[in-house]
Image (cartoon, rainbow, N blue to C red):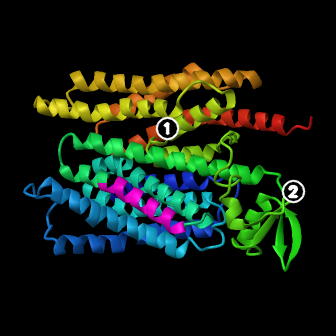
């Protein structure tokens, strides 16, 4: 039974983030078969990576580097960058480039986000099994907050550059830029992790947050491009055998690439211009990757069942993504003067980092970190900080929901339930029989409380969408 719990902890975060990335594509969802293949390819990439990492240690005399304190910091940095980061990211890159890049279903830049993210999720999931099963619950929780999102969003970043490479001139420049960037991020992460210094955990979190920020920014940028392709009414003609055929919109062109009736090198002519242009050139021109920044993605709801899957399988970590998403949606919807990224970063820093500072301080004072005189008040304060951020968000949501809905979620009750469950989770002793099972139950209940809010949000966005689509 304990092994099954650890397997759940090991594979849950990677699978949940894979589902999150898959459903990020609202315009041209990729074939599930190819998505699953990408995930499996990421998992398979772990095996050659592990072999080459071991060979690297043998060749350069670095056996035992991770446990032997006699190795210097530069030896650890050398191994982190060239023995781990270069090897792992190159394996992911080669699997993605070799098996997915040329598939005709890869028919717009945003698809790179999906397939790159899936490769990262698969790699993180298989690697996690090798660490969590022997390492236990604490290793699983720590990797859920660090290694898993690091692998996943490195994959998203790599996919962003592959998406640009396939649809722009000078593909090699984009390919090498993407590979170089993720190697640097991964190398910095491992250098900090291998140092074994007390401060290293904070540097690890900073690197993970920076990589996650870059990944989400890349995803959002190409999402705007997909939105533009799906909504553009501009017409083009395809030039075949010296004759014009069409007209076709960008959406028609994208779909034609997927069904094989059109190629990236086919020549197009604009409806009101005589200048010839390839499909590749069109998708990379000012109306492609250089689309106007004023284009907005209309906010949409999220099925409650998927919200619960994300929340449960990431042990509540999805709260941070949900918080960011809603801040962004309402900022775009109402032109609010707020910074979603800064708010989410503040939430993460104030609710995660203090646990490590708390432990370091008490260990330095040679005191028991589970001393109830300190442990209970500390966890009440942490639950209160978490709930305060949530309250600010829910109050804003409640205000806007009242514009279109006569009745919505009970704000005070939802906040109280979330706070109570958060306190119970934090005070639950790890040595309690079936503690992991009890925590999963509390997580599901906590997610259920927020699912009530998500249900009302779905209604709100649907009402708004109907109003926008209503004939004048």
* Mark 2 closeness class: few <14, some 14–19, many ≥20 residues within 10 Å: few
Label 1 close to label 2 by CB (< 8 Å): no
Q: Nearer the viewer, mark 1 or mark 2?
A: 2
Q: Is residue 146 left or right of residue 454?
A: left
Q: Magenta span has 124?
A: no
Which of 160 and 376 lies nearest the eye of the viewer? 160
* Mark 1 closeness class: few <14, some 14–19, many ≥20 residues within 10 Å: many
Q: What residue appears at the point 63 percent right and 50 percent down from the top-left corner?
A: 223
Extreme residue toward the bottom, this view: 241
Picture quarter with the N terminus: bottom left
Q: Is residue 25 left or right of residue 364?
A: right
Q: What residue appears at the point 73 percent right and 63 percent down from the top-left corner?
A: 254
Picture quarter with the C terminus: top right
Nearer the N terminus, badge 1 or badge 2?
2
Is 54 rendered above or below residue 211?
Answer: below
Q: Magenta span has 183?
A: yes
Q: Is residue 334 left or right of residue 357?
A: right
Which of 242 and 124 lies nearest the eye of the viewer? 242
Disc 1: which residue: 319
Extreme residue toward the left, this view: 70
Q: Residue 89 appears in which quarter of the rendering? A: bottom left
Q: Is residue 16 left or right of residue 76?
A: right
Label 2 SS: loop
Instruction: Read off the magenta span.
Output: 171-187
Task: Report whether residue 439 is seen.
Answer: yes
């Amino acid at each position: 039974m304990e092994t099954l719990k650890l397997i759940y902890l090991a594979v849950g975060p990677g699978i949940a983030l894979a589902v999150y990335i898959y459903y990020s594509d609202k315009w041209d969802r990729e074939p599930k078969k190819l998505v699953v293949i990408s995930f499996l390819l990421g998992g398979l990439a772990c095996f050659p990576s592990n072999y080459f990492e071991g060979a690297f240690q043998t060749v350069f005399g670095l056996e035992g580097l991770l446990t032997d304190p006699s190795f210097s910091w530069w030896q650890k940095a050398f191994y982190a960058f060239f023995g781990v980061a270069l090897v792992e990211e190159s394996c992911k890159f080669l699997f993605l480039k070799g098996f997915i890049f040329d598939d005709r279903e890869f028919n717009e830049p945003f698809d790179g986000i999906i397939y790159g993210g899936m490769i990262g999720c698969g790699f993180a999931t298989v690697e996690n099994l090798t660490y969590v099963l022997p390492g236990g619950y604490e290793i699983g929780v720590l990797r859920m907050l660090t290694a898993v999102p690091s692998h996943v969003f490195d994959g998203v970043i790599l996919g962003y550059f592959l998406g640009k490479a396939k649809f722009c001139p000078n593909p090699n420049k984009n390919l090498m830029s993407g590979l170089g960037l993720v190697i640097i991020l991964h190398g910095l992460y491992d250098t900090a992790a291998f140092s074994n210094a007390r401060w290293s955990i904070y540097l690890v979190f900073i690197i993970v947050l920076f990589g996650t920020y870059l990944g989400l920014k890349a995803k959002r940028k190409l999402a705007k491009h997909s939105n533009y392709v799906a909504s553009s009414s501009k017409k083009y003609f395809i030039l075949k055998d010296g004759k014009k055929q069409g007209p076709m919109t960008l959406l028609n062109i994208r779909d034609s690439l997927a069904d094989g009736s059109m190629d990236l090198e086919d020549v197009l002519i604009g409806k009101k211009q005589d200048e010839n242009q390839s499909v590749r050139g069109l998708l990379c021109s000012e109306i492609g990757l250089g689309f106007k920044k004023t284009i907005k993605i209309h906010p949409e709801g999220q099925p409650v069942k998927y919200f619960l899957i994300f929340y449960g399988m990431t042990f509540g970590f999805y709260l941070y993504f949900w918080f960011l998403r809603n801040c962004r949606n309402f900022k775009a919807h109402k032109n609010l003067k707020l910074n979603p990224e800064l708010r989410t970063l503040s939430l993460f820093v104030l609710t995660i980092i203090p646990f490590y500072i708390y432990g370091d301080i008490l260990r330095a004072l040679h005191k028991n970190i589970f001393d109830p005189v300190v442990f209970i008040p500390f966890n009440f304060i942490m639950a209160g900080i978490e709930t305060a951020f949530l309250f600010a968000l829910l109050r804003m949501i409640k205000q806007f929901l009242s514009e279109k809905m006569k009745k919505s979620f009970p704000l005070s009750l939802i906040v109280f339930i979330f706070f109570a469950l958060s306190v119970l989770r934090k005070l639950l002793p790890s040595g309690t029989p079936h503690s992991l099972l009890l925590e999963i139950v509390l997580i599901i209940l906590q997610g259920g409380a927020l699912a009530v809010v998500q249900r009302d949000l779905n209604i709100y966005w649907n009402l708004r969408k109907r109003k926008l689509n209503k004939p004048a």
